[in-house]
Amino acid sequence: MIRILHLADLHLGYEPSLPSPWDQRVARERDGLLSRAVDLALKQKVHMVVIAGDLFDHHRPAPGLVESVIRELRRLEKEGIRVITVPGNHDEITYHDSVYRQGSWPGFLVTNPHPQVVTCWEIEGQRCRIVSMAYVEGATRINGLLDSFPAAEPGCLNLAVFHGSLDWEGGDRSLPLSGEALARAGYHYVALGHIHRGGERRWPGGMALYAGMVAGKNFSDPGVGYWTLVCLGEGGPRVERIPEKVSGWQAEDIDLSAFSRPEEVEEAIGHKASSSGGLLQVRLTGSPPFFLSQE
């Protein structure tokens, strides 16, 4: 049984548009996500950590943040945990000053612009073969959905890692992938990044899965609030979602036509705020039977 912590879209370094001090609090929380992920990987005794793109929110993050990330990934290496990192569209490797072009990167860094077998590892007596790619402008050529992938190798565990959009053509940088072609290739597990809300597609003996963004960016992109742990062995992939406590982005509607006095509206908003446990956006709808001050 091979245990994998599937990470994607951590977007470290993202600066939320929030009033102080919430902006700093949420930014610190996000930048600490990798440390929490490493703690979890060590606790769960995983064999491999897969980072399926957009580890950073920008291709050139702050030096202090980069140093912190490298320290965390070294913690995994020290414990013998394999690490593979795929650049995303936010932290794209195309740029000459990309974080992934500055010195050595812990674990295995994917840099090839086309799908290919990037590495083979022996884990717990099982040969693990990994197919991946990194979008590189000017080198990666896409015409519709990308549908040419190396076929699975019999007798070993076949994994693939991509930061792209499954069966959706959102432009070259979204790396549109054919789900049918991935299923036809016969991989046991395809670790995906790019779609923040999560999601999966299964086929006999395998599946493709978006880990989702653990901590949200805003009220329209609230994140999933869990880590994705995958166990691969006989019987196909088994997925476990482990909750992570992060600042939630919760949106609630209040219909003003249901109230007779402004004080009742204030009370309703206060009740929702006290029970939200995170960041709350209240949207007022309907027409009140009274004057509602904007102050």
Image (cartoon, rainbow, N blue to C red):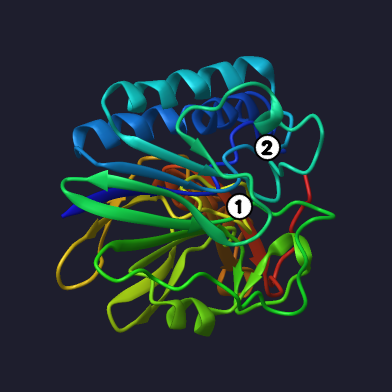
Tell whether label 1 touches label 2 (CB within 8 Å).
no
The residue that disc 2 covers is: 16
Q: Could you tell me the amino acid type at mark 2? A: Pro
Kind of element beneath mark 1: strand
Mark pair 2, 1: CA separation: 15 Å
Looking at the image, residue 108 lies above or below residue 264: above
Q: Residue placed at 67% from the left, 25% from the top?
A: 20
Is tag 2's residue or tag 1's residue first in the polypeptide sequence?
A: 2
- Density class for disc 1 (Cα within 10 Å; few <14, some 14-19, many ≥20) is some
Residue 31 at x, y percent in the picture: 54, 28
Residue that appears at 71% across and 44% down:
92
Q: Position of residue 55 (x, y in %)?
A: 57, 40
Question: What residue is shown at x 66% (from left), y 77% (from top)?
Answer: 168
Q: Nearer the viewer, residue 129 or 256?
A: 129
* Quarter of the figure with the N terminus: bottom left
Residue at (27% x, 29% y) in the render = 80
Residue 87 in view, yes or no: yes
Instruction: Please state which of residues 275 and 111 is positioned toward the viewer in this rendering.
Output: 111
Asked which quadrant contains residue 94, the reply is: top right
From the image, tell me which residue sits under label 1.
281
Q: The C terminus appears in which quarter of the rendering?
A: top right
Q: Nearer the viewer, residue 294 or 218?
A: 218
